[in-house]
Amino acid sequence: MDVEKVRRQLVAPVRIFIVRSVTFVALLAACSGGESPRSDTPTGGTLVISVGGDPETLLPPIATTTTAQIIGDLVYDRLAEIGDSLNTVGDSGFHPRLAEAWEWAADSLSVTFRMNPRARWHDGVPVRSSDVVFTYRLYSDSLNGSPYAVALADVDSVTAPDSLTATIWFRERSPMQFYDAVNTMSILPAHVLGNVRGPALRSSPLSRAPIGSGRFRFVKWSAAQSIELAADTANYRRRPNLDRVIITIAPDMNTALARLAGGEADMLEQIPAASVANIAKDTSMRVLLTNGLDYNFIQFNLSDPGFPSRAHRLFGDRELRRALTLALDRASIVQNAYDSLADVAIGPTVRAYPTTDPSLRQLAFSRDAAIRTLDSLGWKDSNNDGVRERNGVRLEFSLSVPTSSKARVAMAELIQEQFRRVGAKVNIDALDIPAFVDLQNRRRFDAVIGGWHVEPSPGGVRQTWGSRGAQTSGSNYGSYRNSAFDAQVDSALAANTLEERRSHFSRAYQIIIDDAPAIWLAEPKRVMAVHKRIRTVGLRPDAWWANIAEWSIPASERIARDRIATGR
């Protein structure tokens, strides 16, 4: 396989989003994605980031929230890290981390990593190849229920020929094998976790007080308040420029915005469209518009919440799901919630992927067609109370939404009204992040307004919408299963040219769009607010936080501001 040829075919330039609204164009015209740190700025200072909710755990194999991913990526290291180009084919886009070098076998069925001998866990114990073996076992052990295990399906085993050498063995060759293996696993300390398995992982000390090898050390977690990290000053890759990073928990957007305006936080990773104008007027802030890898959707639970082996009383019916999709004017909903800072989502993908065809055929809004379909399916409003019913079952369901997302809450209210117009009653169930995540994990919902921040590779769709992801430990919470969809995704990921890959993904996306296990809502652009004292670099589309260790704060803007941020 000519990996370099494949890489040239599949890597596309980073796309620049154009903000259509005249108001936002004027506000953001001078904004940029980041700044280079000043060469005369010494290390030091505290960065305070406002996020929407507590993570459910800080153990990477079972963590699913964005907050947990931020902490995990700063505290732990992978063997190698994907670069800003997001090239996921072969290994040419990756940079050394715990592995200082690697070498492929002649048949490309194994890759051997040479570990950096200077790497240490934050408790002082050396990082060794046995930690890599342990990490693979933990991620892939079905008893542990890691939602990321599906990405390691093509890894046959991991061995450690000596203490500084780890070899990953593959079942078969594929363009994505290096990415799937390396990007999936944050290397974990075997000497800390030991033989902990299964449900005990969630209650293990490491789930709340991680010990990693990254450039930041964990300091403390004050539940529902903040998480504090400190620079690992003796880190094998050099200490970070910042002294500390504090993640402050703001359960609702109003609180987050107030903290930003009041100087209690330095940055907010996603500001609502309605707040852009006010923040842009603040002379102490910068508004950054970056590429987005997010999309949100109404996900139907195709299984009965109480009896997973049974079909849902409503959403087990494909034609009913399609009728409800026709009933929603998604363009007006997205415009109302995001102004011009989001596009209507086109499926379980994002437009930034070169493998996405933006002209996929959608179930277009038509209230009349929705009403005709519901009538033909036997859903009638027989007692004139505004709600259809069939065989004694009312067309009524709950729609769960996280309160931390102002846009999703706004969309839920619009969705409720538009469904009412076709005779479907929606009860909005607004939950804080921990309760919302728990509801999804246990599959105890009718429908949710979910969202995914996708990985650099479109292959993550196997985990979130594929049949394997519908298993109890997977992230396909709605339990959608379609073997034809799975096959097209598998074929896409095995393809060696962009044309082939795009063709198979298009077929897969069309299958799932037509099946309507979800109603694809919005693909938001990321609009961040950052205090001007912060010198940001390398805002990666998939993980804006990836290069925080290189961010800096000029000494002249450090001491007084840090006292406000930390209360010290």
Image (cartoon, rainbow, N blue to C red):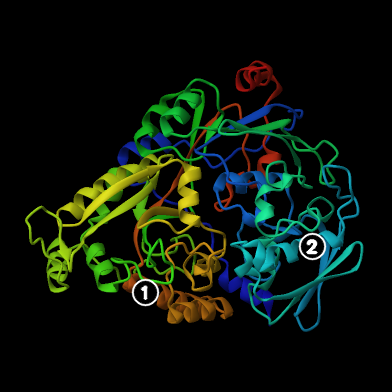
Residue at image point 38% right, 32% down: 275
Residue at image point 47% right, 45% down: 435
Amino acid type, mark 2: Phe
Task: State the image coordinates of residue 478 (x, y, percent, origin top left).
Answer: 42, 64
Nearest to the eye among marks 2 and 1: give it.
2
Residue assigned mark 2:
134
The answer to whether residue 60 is left or right of residue 165 is left
Residue at the limit of the structure toward the right, as seen here: 162
For the N terminus, which image quadrant? bottom right
How packed mark 2 is, by other alpha carbons closer than 10 Å (few <14, some 14-19, many 20 or more), is many
Element type at marker 2? helix
Residue assigned mark 1:
510
| Count of marks placed on residues | 2
Element type at marker 1? helix
Q: CA distance from mark 2 to mark 1?
A: 39 Å
The answer to whether residue 172 is left or right of residue 263 is right
How packed mark 1 is, by other alpha carbons closer than 10 Å (few <14, some 14-19, many 20 or more), is some
Task: State the image coordinates of residue 436 (x, y, percent, origin top left).
Answer: 45, 47
Task: State the image coordinates of residue 44 (x, y, percent, origin top left).
Answer: 74, 27
Residue at image point 48% right, 64% down: 476
